[in-house]
Amino acid sequence: MAIHAKREEIAAHVARDLGLGALAGLSPEERAAVDQQTAETIEGCDPALPEPADCSDADRTMRRLLSEHHALSELRADEANELLAERGEVFAPEDDA
């Protein structure tokens, strides 16, 4: 899955930023820390948030990776909505009343 691969790219970048080296060589504890930092970075820098974190201190590579992850996330959501619509599982907002 493309979004998983992009998340792994972000995790690899986080690991390097933390001075831990390659993902393959991390201990379970180090990998857990990298995964936590990766999740916080992705979630905190999401431009769709009402008040996204200031991610201007991220380097160009990280900003590009986050932008690509966000685009893949939006694409995935659009595809899921299309699939639900094809199955007739999407309702108009007024049906929620």
Image (spheres, helix red, strand yellow):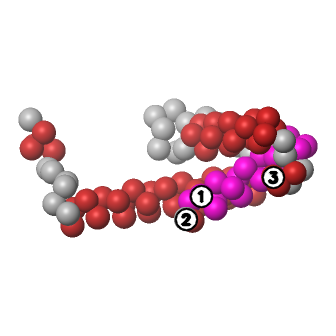
Q: Amino acid at mark 1?
A: His
Q: Amino acid at mark 2?
A: Met
Of residues 14 and 51, the one drawn nearer to the viewer in this rendering? 14
- Badge number at residue 13: none
Quarter holding residue 58? top right
Of residues 50 and 2, the one drawn nearer to the viewer in this rendering? 2
Of residues 8 and 45, the one drawn nearer to the viewer in this rendering? 8
Q: Where is 77 relative to 2, above or below? A: above
Gap between marks 2 and 1 measured at Cα: 5 Å
Q: Is residue 60 visible?
A: no
> Considering only order in the chain, which callout, 2 or 3, is on the residue closer to the N terminus?
2
The range drawn in magenta is 3-20
Contact flag, marks 2 and 1 (Cβ < 8 Å): yes
User: How packed is label 2: few (under 14 Cα within 10 Å), some, or many (20 or more)?
Assistant: few
SS category of the residue bearing label 1: helix
- Badge number at residue 23: 3
- Badge number at residue 1: 2
Q: Amino acid at mark 3?
A: Leu
Horizontal side of 25 relative to 96 (left or right) equals right
Residue reaching furthest to the front: 28
Quarter holding residue 85? bottom left
> Considering only order in the chain, which callout, 1 or 3, is on the residue closer to the N terminus?
1
Residue at figure coordinates x 75%, y 57% from the top left = 61
SS category of the residue bearing label 3: helix
Horizontal side of 49 relative to 54 (left or right) equals left
Instruction: Determine which residue is flagged by label 1.
Output: 4
